[in-house]
Image: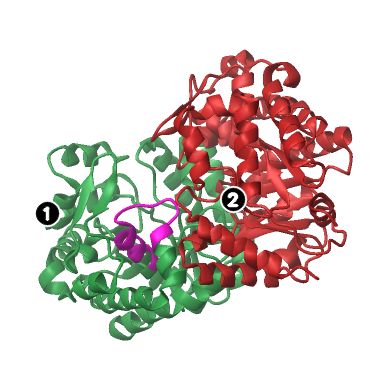
Chain colours: A green, B red
Amino acid sequence: MNSLERFVSACRKQSPDRTPAWVMRQAGRYLPEYREIRKGHDFLEMVHTPELACEVTCQPLRRFDMDAAVIFSDILVPCEAMGQRVEFVEGVGPVLHDPIRSEAGVAALSDFSAREATGFLAAAIERVRAEIGPDKAIIGFCGAPFTMASYMIEGGSSRNFEHTKALLYGDTPLFYALAEKLVTNLIPYLVMQAEAGANALQIFDSWGGALDAATYRERLLPHVARLVRETRAAVGREVPIILYLNGGAHLLEVLADADPDVIGLDWRVDPADAIERVGDRVALQGNLDPCTLFAPPAVVGRETARVLDAFADQEGHVFNLGSGILPKTPVASMEALFAEVHSRLPG
Amino acid sequence: MNSLERFVSACRKQSPDRTPAWVMRQAGRYLPEYREIRKGHDFLEMVHTPELACEVTCQPLRRFDMDAAVIFSDILVPCEAMGQRVEFVEGVGPVLHDPIRSEAGVAALSDFSAREATGFLAAAIERVRAEIGPDKAIIGFCGAPFTMASYMIEGGSSRNFEHTKALLYGDTPLFYALAEKLVTNLIPYLVMQAEAGANALQIFDSWGGALDAATYRERLLPHVARLVRETRAAVGREVPIILYLNGGAHLLEVLADADPDVIGLDWRVDPADAIERVGDRVALQGNLDPCTLFAPPAVVGRETARVLDAFADQEGHVFNLGSGILPKTPVASMEALFAEVHSRLPG
């Protein structure tokens, strides 16, 4: 089995020869060769330039024997394409101008043509395919409605999501209008990535864990489920859809009801608990605590083994961290992680 | 039943006449009269000055018919008393100098006499009692070992707790030495608060939700359980102990095993789920989403009712937010919240 077959097979709850592995945000600042390129280019310039996006996407695969490349991009790309100005300010993070908090704000957002407005992403995926060949998986992605809406409504990152929740609870029709517009645009955006060569599509709900299950089920699930359903209708079952949510131990059943192929688990979720609650319905991805990678390599190996063992009985497991790798992670930790994953290779 | 009886009765799973209510961080920046005092004094000065701490503790009770006053203080007070310099920097948050990351760092922390080093807190509690009289509950508090250790190790707030977890996973004996020293000092610190007049003691594990259940159970629970056990041995069953953890839907059983009287739930926890999992062992406190208070008053009333209804069958429920009230919360929202709570008064 090659990496692509192994990866897709695990996502589809079939029987790979071993557990496939990749790492969220594996193309990033913990790599000196990434930092070197980043010196000469700002973050959005890298996202917008297929040569650069391709180069940093491929960097980790040259160092570690990963089963998948995740395309270097950002979940805020569709916000830009819809007409909200996005900046990345050093030391602050993303700044989205003119936060969307009114009907007029939502109305001003335009539907976009994925190929026309975000063709750089398709081009980057095509370049990655040319470089890594047909045997590795490429993962495309987008943000989930709550996460995307929170950036657009708050105007950037947020600790508590006051404005977003004020709309969600207090002016639900306006929130729904935004969520619908987002999903309408995210579907062709994901489809474009699959057409360009992505073998799997991950929906990141980085902040959805800030909602209780009843609220998520009633107010977000319909939008997420539509995103999954209509994307799958277009790309087919052979491109698995992964739904990742950070801080979602209380939301597993709700996420499974969105009907993704895979649920991505953060590190707080007990694997046995996840297997029992939703493991028969979906494949599971995760879930090593990224902070483990700040401990010595022997500890990284031991904790990686603990995660692999915990999912041993799950039909369909993709090894990953429980959230994105942190910028100061030692490269030696990633080596220890993959050494442990590969020690499980059957022959 | 007066407020004190109602509050303690709910905490002890007896039968209060109605659900008692207070609000985490109720003495705070959302009140104009708090901001007025705060103009003339820095945060730590207010914590250290019994007159000021008493005044802001009592402010919310003059506006809202709450069942309890929570003493105005800070969980970092014991860090100072142990010899680590603590500063509150406007716009940054707490800064703890010389982060503790070595054996020498732990060894340099000194045990403190609660009355000598933190007598201002006892004095503040005594003043509050004199002002509010015997019929209202006073709540004292401290931080839990993981939360306290994380501030001391990171040197302040942290998003990912890299250094703390590097020790927890990679140099566990050092982490344990710090946790033990903390608990040894927190016990007499809590006891002092009860002796000064606190009717209940809350242990805040603000950041413990960043750990998975297996790690929390193995590495933190013994320290938390000792804090609960030895404090209770000193103050007696009549002073209930509340264990609050933010982001802890995955940790309820572990927290119950620490044997507090009450578990404080954040807003993400489904009440029915909590009742089923631990409701027979402990009373429950919570858990309205504090962001609800940014919606119009009618929505606040409706969501408050939803929480009260969800806990209707729980023997022992204390109404509260699921985490601290946010600084920009409109006062009208608090009015709507308490109006709904009081609408449930039986006669």
- Mark drawn on residue B124: none
Tell me which chain the residue with mark 1 is part of.
A
Task: Give the side of residue A59 with respect to residue A42, left or right.
Answer: right
Q: Main secondary structure of the magenta part?
A: helix
- Name the spot of residue A195 as percent of width and height, x first: 21, 75
Give the residue type that dot 1 points to. Answer: Glu
Displayed quadrant of residue A83: bottom left
Of badges 2 and 1, nearer the viewer stands 2
- What residue appears at the point 17 percent right and 52 percent down from the top-left corner? A44
Residue tagged by mark 2?
B246
Q: Nearer the viewer, residue B32 or B142?
A: B32
Badge 2 vs badge 1, beta-carbon distance below 8 Å = no
Give the residue type that dot 2 points to. Answer: Asn
- For the question of whether residue B269 can be seen, the reply is no
| Secondary element at tag 2 | loop
Q: Badge 2 local density, few (<14 within 10 Å), some, or many (20+)? A: many
Q: Nearer the viewer, residue B161 or B4?
A: B4
Q: Badge 1 local density, few (<14 within 10 Å), some, or many (20+)? A: some
**Which span of residues is magenta-colored?**
A146-163
Are discs 2 and 1 located on one and the same chain? no
